[in-house]
Image: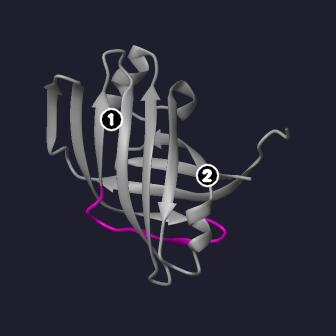
Amino acid sequence: MPEPSFRHLLTLTAHLERPQMVAQTPVGGRKIVMVTGGTFEGERLRGKVLPGGGDWALTRDDGSLVLDVRLTLEAEDGDLIFVTYRGVRHGPDAVMKRLSAGEPVDPSEYYFRIAPLFETASEKYGWLNRIICVGTGERLKAGPRYTIYEML
């Protein structure tokens, strides 16, 4: 069986509100953060992240942050694309403390990966409904930036 190969799909930057909720629940530390906007750009599509999406993140006992994100993207031609992804972010305690404090941290110092799925009624972008993607993330001051790759 051939090894998988990847092609850059897009880079997405999201802007976040302050968390709506930060609480220790029976299943872990819950943080709910709404998305206020952002942008995405790739060779085959580009546009903006619409406000109203969010991340229902959970910090597990082992310190890993598990992402549960839903976003609506609007391509530059007006077509809408729903994207949902799960992901994991973790790293050494000292690095994660710097990240939480809002300090710039090189993404090579921590693990930040996502597995997005796309859904659209658009004929032009219907191919997104039929692909598998993975992405790498980095935490910027305004929010996360993801580089997303289509698995070929």
- Which residue sits furthest bottom? 77
Q: The magenta stretch spans which residues?
A: 42-53
Residue 120 visible from this viewpoint = yes
Q: Is residue 39 above or below residue 55?
A: below
Q: Is residue 31 above or below residue 117?
A: above
Residue at 23 percent across and 24 percent down: it is: 27
Which residue in the protein does label 2 denote? 132
Residue 50: quadrant of the picture: bottom left
The spot of residue 31 in percent (x, y) is 22, 37
The spot of residue 143 in percent (x, y) is 36, 48
**Magenta run includes residue 110:** no
Residue at 34 percent across and 22 percent down: it is: 97
Q: For the image shown, how many numbered marks are present on the structure?
A: 2
Q: In this view, does 74 lie above or below 16?
A: below
Q: How far apart are marks 1 and 2 (CA)?
A: 32 Å
Q: In this view, does 108 lie above or below 115?
A: above
The N terminus appears in which quarter of the rendering? top right
Mark 1 burial class by Cα count in 10 Å: few <14, some 14-19, many 20+: few
Of labels 1 and 2, earlier in sequence is 1
Which residue in the protein does label 1 denote? 102
Query: Front-most of 41 and 105?
Result: 41
The spot of residue 37 in percent (x, y) is 33, 63
Residue at 37 percent across and 33 percent down: it is: 66
